[in-house]
Image (spheres, grey):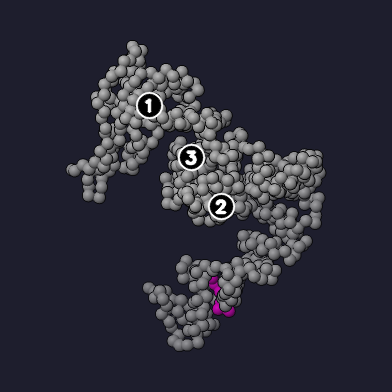
Amino acid sequence: MKTITLLITLLTLSSSLFAQKLSKEEKQAYRQLYPRLWRPTLKVLNGMDDRGYETYYTNKVTSIEYAGISEEYTAKKAELEKYFISGLLPLRYVGKTSEEGIHYFQDGWAYADSYYNMHLKRYQTLSKDVTLNRIYDFQTENGPALVVETKKKDADKYFYGLILLDDMTKLMDKVEKNEIGVFEDERDGAYYKWSKIGEQIWMAENLKYKLEEHTAMESELGWSVYKGKFYNYSQAMTSCPKGWHLPSDAEWKELELIAGVWPRDINVEGAISREGIDTLPGNELIGSERLMFFAHLAGSVSKSFSSYSDASAGQNGYFWTSTKSDEVNAMIRMVGKDFTGIVRDKLGAQNYFSCRCMQDQDISVIVEKYPSLKEATDKINADPTNASNYFDRSVEFLLLGEGKRAMDDINKATELDPNDPELKLFKAQILYQYSFDLSADETRKLVDDYTASIKDNPYAYYFQSKLWLYEAEGGALTATYDQDKRDKSLEGIKKALELDPKNPQFLDYHAKLLVVFREYSNAVKALKKAVLSDPNNGDLRILLGKMMLKNYDEYNKNNGSTSQKWCTAMTGRCFKINTKQLGEVCRVFVKGVELGANLDPDYRTLCNELEQAKTLKKHAPIVYIGPRGGRYTINSNGNKCYIPRR
């Protein structure tokens, strides 16, 4: 069997271990060091190619020469330990050969898993349960280097990594200038790298704080320090360490402008790569030494019942913002290998994406950026005991997607004026938008208390109806099956319509609520009212047509109608309906399409078949061979009969 070597890499430098004079202590240190070093595999099997040949990857290594103990850096080990453990000072893999030589992996260490998939581990990963033991001087073909020796606490186990002295000097210079650094999460002792970008301080790696759900998730998917953990929107909002927060859409925009996104496109939304004028903004976030953000392409995770699946790992990175775009979606950012810009889009809050936390800024920093916030803040400074001033600023924060700050201000306003029901109603709106799955009972009580005292606010009843309709989990909203809650929801919207009977928003919601409850007859009546109130809404007409189909089908089945079934051509959904009823439905569909709404092609086939049936009735022959080989006939009642192909 022929062997193909993909990369010839082993470079051997002829050098003498003790070419320079070493002290007795340094020689002794080397004798202790060498046996502890890892002996890696240099050739990695990577399966068979399509011709049945074995293929190998040969790890690229460079020989290095021992130069003694680094007294200077070993003396600083207590100060340097967190920088090495966190990876802020990245360590490349170090190993030994059988010829008493030591080498390091320039590009990382490649290995093949049990499925013959190749993986490359670029840097040595150290856990927090190691301590920095000693640092050695080495010489490499790329200049002086340090080999760092770490020891597992309470165990005789050692780990080694190499960093070029020139790289370390540059990084430590950034540390001294407060451009990069490390902080410790007091919850679990984890270290995180951070980078100052403009006036913001961002995590330079994905959040890895473990929640209870991650145990189940990782039993199927596993996890890595590189990827961090995956969070749904609600989890993301509450998982950043103390002093840090999930950044808003506006805060991401500040970062993106520095990364090079063209200011003209900064507000563009959708699956569109927003590019730069003379930079590649996505690439800047992924790999720029200038920003040191290092966006990880960890992919995303989805959940179906209790099962998890991942997608796009190694291709795209998805990151939450704290800004909700509507009740069920939040703004996200995406970078990837297949495009060079940054995507700003909205996706369902039930998805699991990565988190990059941002350090909290003083409120004055944010206030100065927005005139409306500054005006509200000036009023607070002039009269700090006036609750309405905090209320006004809370509204401004909410409009900016700053849910946490909006909540802080409304709580302050409520503290100053605990009897104002409007403050409680607005607090409920913030909770509904940002943490309904964690505070559903509190949110409902706030609105119930409001409607118990204020009985002439139709919006409050409409809002109350929605709160009783929905159950929330992980940011996703689903209609409740609890009959008591359904009754309360219907009662709320009816009260809203009593106060404001022509409100298009209320009429639309009422109709859709009846659709959810499968009260098709009442839904049709409500939708007709909604259409009269909003005659140019094509989507309402499409929904009306669909509900008319369901209502006719249900009525005809329950009343023993002899009407034949009409079935859609693609999915085979069938409705017991006569040609007159179907004609009414199709006229509603046509009007909806004329107003710009989209009609599922499957429903179009029903109307196409109706027109075809009319033609058959008007023109012989009675029997027609259909496009799928079946036959259509028209019975004495004028209904179409379909005889499928055998």
Cα distance in 3D space between marks 3 and 1: 23 Å
Q: Earlier in the sequence, mark 1 or mark 2?
A: 1
Residue found at the far top of this picture? 24
Residue under pointer 2: 263
SS label for mark 2:
helix
User: Of residues 208 and 579, which is closer to you in this image?
Assistant: 208
Return the x and y of residue 480 as percentages of the image width and height: 62, 53
Quick one: quadrant of the N terminus?
Answer: top left
Identify the residue at image location x=62%, y=60%. 516
Evaluate whether residue 362 shows in this view: yes
Position of residue 538 measured from the top left corner of the image (x, y, whole percent): 61, 69
Q: Nearer the viewer, residue 328 or 66?
A: 66
Tell me the residue that label 1 is attached to. Answer: 145
> Mark 3 = which residue?
290
Q: Within 10 Å of the Cα at label 2, are there few (<14), some (14-19), or many (20+) other Cα atoms?
A: some
Which span is picked out in magenta? 575-581
Q: Are marks 3 and 1 in contact (CB under 8 Å)?
A: no
Whether residue 299 is visible, yes or no, is: no
How far apart in space, not on screen, are marks 1 and 2 (Cα)? 43 Å
Q: Is residue 343 left or right of residue 529?
A: left
For marks 2 and 3, give the CA distance: 20 Å
Q: Callout 2, which amino acid?
A: Pro
Residue located at (75% from left, 40% from top): 412
**Residue at the spot 43% in from the left edge and 45% down from the top edge:** 313
Q: Secondary structure at mark 3?
A: loop
Please tell me whether residue 200 is drawn above or below residue 70 in the rendered image.
below
**Among the 4 quarters of the image, the one containing residue 407:** top right
Q: Position of residue 91 (x, y in %)?
A: 41, 30
Q: Are marks 1 and 2 in contact (CB under 8 Å)?
A: no
- The residue at the point 25 percent across, 47 percent down is 49
Where residue 308 appears, x then y in whole percent? 47, 45
Does residue 531 sit above or below 54 in this rendering? below
